[in-house]
Image (spheres, rainbow, N blue to C red):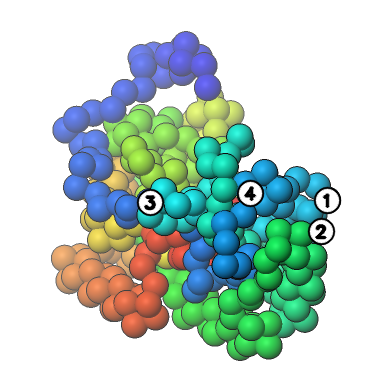
Amino acid sequence: MDSSELVDLFGAPLECDPAIALNSDALRLPIPKTGPLPMVQFQIEIVGPRSMKAAPALAVLDEPWRSGLGYPEVFVMDASDSGWRSPTRPEKAATLDSLVLCWDYLSAKGTLSANACARLVHAAEPFAKSLDRRAMPMPLPQDVDRKVADLKQRQEALDIGFEVGVISGTSTLSERQIWRTCAALGLDLAANGAFVWRAPGWSLPLLSVASWDDGVSFGLDGARADRQHEAIGVGFNVPTNPDPVTSLNACFQVAEALATALGALATDDEGRPYTRAMRAETENAMAQALEAFRRAGLEPGSPEAIKLFPTA
């Protein structure tokens, strides 16, 4: 977005205001990890008693093996590695000790089944044989349907979101003022037409500010026309958030700043004015949600959770 165009439109640069801006310093981000995710991925490890030459092993990254095996994620280990890593081209090691192929049980491409996994094993066997190894599936294909059913239950039970509303009072909500306030809070306009809070080291939004008006998003056209909104929402989804408690507190901070700037009212997602007691209820609901994740053995913001709850 051209900054000079924004200056012309708003009369001054849209800048972060330290007095109200969100602070990401306290965020707890997960430690990145590389390798198979057994909770959410079917795996075939190419196993054998000896090391294998790296060059023929990495033919799995090329056609026709790649397409024939359904474009798996590939991880390797050599004698100097302490854990799985993504292979490199050219490969740093002349030989590899281990190689594993991974497919998501649930993805935008579809859902794995026992029959599909059996076909993957059948397709991997000639590749393993070419390396004088064998293809070892984990779990066995006949156990996959039960695994997938369990994951779908977790998806349904843990698809949890929190949102705070900002509803117009005596007048509608000015989009230009929404832009100014979101910029002051340190939010950026995303491609989907929502203002988002991002933090260094984390690619997904930690919260979003979006219009509650049907089919309406924020954009330059709306700012130029100073489009008026009836209500906006400030929220996030728990599964893909690495620090839901901090993001919930940030939602309240953003909603209060917007309500003050717009002469509006902060509400819950049913339009009831927020009170201290209602905020306490929301914080308690968050604690219960996080307990549900703990019982399910899933951590919000983890690679497993992001696989299970892909964002658009």
As drawn, the label of residue 68 is 2
Which of discs 4 and 1 lies nearer the camera? The answer is 4
Q: Nearer the viewer, residue 13 or 99?
A: 99
Residue type, label 1: Pro
Distance of label 4 from label 3 (alpha carbons): 28 Å
Which of discs 2 and 4 lies nearer the camera? The answer is 4
Distance of label 2 from label 4 (alpha carbons): 21 Å
Distance of label 1 from label 2 (alpha carbons): 6 Å
Residue type, label 3: Pro
Distance of label 1 from label 3 (alpha carbons): 31 Å
Q: Secondary structure at mark 1?
A: loop
**Residue beneath the point at 53% across and 57% down:** 97
Q: Earlier in the sequence, mark 1 or mark 3?
A: 3
Asked if the residue under mark 1 is in contact with the one under mark 4, i.e. CB atoms within 8 Å, the reply is no
Q: Earlier in the sequence, mark 2 or mark 4?
A: 4
Residue 113 lies left or right of residue 294; in this view the side is right
Distance of label 4 from label 1 (alpha carbons): 19 Å
Q: Earlier in the sequence, mark 4 or mark 1?
A: 4
**Residue beneath the point at 39% across and 14% down:** 11
Snapshot quadrant of residue 113 = bottom right
Please give the residue where the numbered disc 4 appears in the rendered image: 53
Q: Earlier in the sequence, mark 4 or mark 3?
A: 3
Q: Position of residue 168 (x, y in %)?
A: 38, 50
| Mark 4 closeness class: few <14, some 14–19, many ≥20 residues within 10 Å | some
Please give the residue where the numbered disc 1 appears in the rendered image: 64
